[in-house]
Amino acid sequence: MRLPLAHSAGVCVALALGAGVVPASSAQPVLVAVDGTLCDLTKTLAAAAASVTCLIPPGGDPHSYRLKPSDRAVIAKSDLIFHIGFGLTPSAKKLKSPGTVVAVGEVALPSYGGSDPHVWHDPVNSARMIRVVSSSLAPLLGDSDRAALQQRTAKAVAVFEALQAWQAKQFSSLPSAQRVMVTDHKTYSHLADRFGLVEIAMLDSHTTGGVLRPSSLKKITEEVTNSGAKTIFSPAAFPNKTLKRISKSTGLPIAKSPLYGEGISAGRNAVSTATVNVCTIVNGQGSSCDVSGANQLNAEWSSIR
């Protein structure tokens, strides 16, 4: 069955109702995860019960990703395809598969009407997406694999609930006036809304097409210097000229470590990427991050099999 993207909001319900159906074929289900974060969630939940192919590599940009011939080949053979939705990856609109396409973020957050597709930065949203992936996969599995999937799902949700508590504790260590994050583009609104941070997306708020004119620089400088921010956070290890100009104008340093806003970073998973982002923000704003707690969360996530 092939469901169009426009119908993805109903996929989760339909699949959940069919959770008692065992596929006629004993072949291992073929899954495709378009986005980096979904890739890790899907691999963790599927374990050895399904074959999972991830399209966007760690550190890749979902906004500009273009499907390759090899991507189209695996998509054509897939039983189930996951992507975030909300326009995060425009090329997802071109997916053509005999399998079911699920916009996981849209199913998990059916009432969200905002403009920030990076929904996974809120751990509550990630837990919801875990449940969507699990309920979508379950009908493709036999009884024993489905039971094991349910166990992995419970463990995965528990880790993200613990992640939420850990993140709340880290941000609460900051004085209220310093619960600010200054970035270039709006990427962390879900994180900011969950934990009561002020997100200043400088280029989105004060420029057109990202062009930094003298009038824009003046407005940005005024807002940032009056915000309580101590650091400017960059999406790249080597900040661009625009961020350097803003840093010079505001007198604020650019964080030595980048924020990973578009998925998982190279060599990390969904949980360790989330914790390193929070530590970068908290340390940059003048507090000290609980690294041992972060490592424990990563170990718990990595132990799910």
Image (cartoon, rainbow, N blue to C red):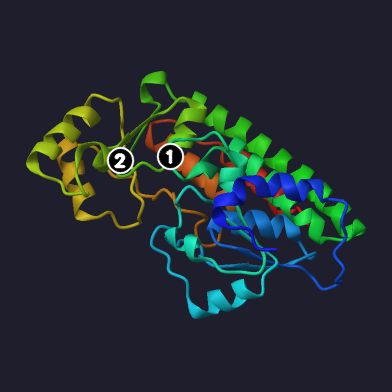
- Judge depth for marks 2 and 1 and give the one in front: 1
Q: Is residue 284 left or right of residue 247?
A: right
Residue 4 % position (x, y):
58, 58
**What kind of element bears circle 1?**
loop
Check disc 2 and give the amino acid type.
Ile
Residue 205 % position (x, y):
25, 36
Q: CA distance from mark 2 to mark 1?
A: 14 Å
Q: Residue at x 10, y 44 (%)?
A: 213
Residue 153 % position (x, y):
76, 47
Residue 230 % position (x, y):
31, 32
Q: Residue at x 72, y 44 (%)?
A: 13
Position of residue 14 relative to residue 79, above or below, is above
> Which quarter of the picture shows residue 154?
top right
State which quarter of the image contains the N terminus.
Answer: bottom right
Read off the residue under disc 1.
188
Check disc 1 and give the amino acid type.
Tyr
Viewer-closest of 42 and 162:
42
Q: Residue at x 82, y 73 (%)?
A: 27
Residue 117 visible (yes or no): yes
Q: Earlier in the sequence, mark 2 or mark 1?
A: 1
State which quarter of the image contains the C terminus.
Answer: bottom right
Q: Is residue 171 left or right of residue 30?
A: left
Binning the other alpha carbons within 10 Å of mark 1 as few (below 14), some (14 to 19) or many (20 upward) gives many
Read off the residue under disc 2.
232
Q: Going by the picture, which residue comes out furthest to the right?
A: 144
